[in-house]
Amino acid sequence: DADVTQTPRNRITKTGKRIMLECSQTKGHDRMYWYRQDPGLGLRLIYYSFDVKDINKGEISDGYSVSRQAQAKFSLSLESAIPNQTALYFCATGGVSGSYNEQFFGPGTRLTVL
Amino acid sequence: GESVGLHLPTLSVQEGDNSIINCAYSNSASDYFIWYKQESGKGPQFIIDIRSNMDKRQGQRVTVLLNKTVKHLSLQIAATQPGDSAVYFCAENINDYKLSFGAGTTVTVRA
């Protein structure tokens, strides 16, 4: 969905490196989310934000941090990447223009930690 | 903890047949459910949703059924087409504005 963009789309890094994944949206939504997807496990919530400067932990926030400096942008950081953080990462948005809690997803970032 | 789950990880369907994808949930307080479709290399896309005060909702070629008595959700796809090949996720609204996702069912359409 072009309304939610993620950069980079693919990234290979080494253990111990700091990585930042960026998410931008043009939907004007207040709510933004970061999920992680692993084979056979579906999507798990890392962090979410309901407004600028609002940050909330999801079910698997350890090892991650986020920043919401503007309504349209929500970045995810891995302070010191480790191999078990190899996964597909999705950003999503939600807002009043959608259904009750419909979330709109970006195309994903494939992260490999060696 | 409470979670959403799908009955089968894979489903193979003949083109033109109807598909039924099942999902069991355990949170009786969930008030809203969504089905998402994820094609290879893409993010999940919304298919259809249903609120807990409904039993059935229809869209274009898709129908979602909700049975709150047994906490079961299903997605029916009519006249399955090759473009329906994807991973399908059910998700439940576990509290305000947070979704919990099942593991997904991979649907393969045979020509």
Image (cartoon, coloured by chain):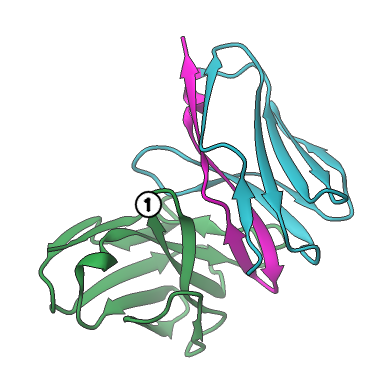
Q: Quadrant of residue B53?
A: bottom right
Could you tell me which residue is drawn at 54 percent across and 69 percent down?
A28
What is the letter of the cyan chain? B
Could you tell me which residue is drawn at 56 percent across and 75 percent down?
A30
Query: Where residue A59 sits in the image (x, y, percent)?
Result: 50, 75
* Foreground residue among B80 and A37: A37
Could you tell me which residue is drawn at 49 percent across and 19 percent down?
B109
Magenta part mainly helix, strand or loop? strand
The chain that hosts pointer 1 is A
Amino acid identity at mark 1:
Pro
* Foreground residue among B8 and A65: B8
Query: Where A32 sits versus B33, above or below?
Result: below
Q: Quadrant of the N terminus of chain B?
A: bottom right
Query: Where A38 sits versus B15, above or below?
Result: below
What is the letter of the green chain? A
Could you tell me which residue is drawn at 52 percent across and 63 percent down?
A27
Query: Where A48 sits versus B28, above or below?
Result: below
Return the residue at label 1. A107
Horizontal side of residue B66 vs B107, given as left or right: right
Secondary structure state at the residue bearing disc 1: loop
Q: Quadrant of residue B64?
A: top right
Query: Which stretch is magenta?
Result: B82-111
Asked if the magenta segment contains residue B68, the reply would be no
Q: Count the numbered circles shown.
A: 1
Horizontal side of residue B39 vs A17, given as left or right: right
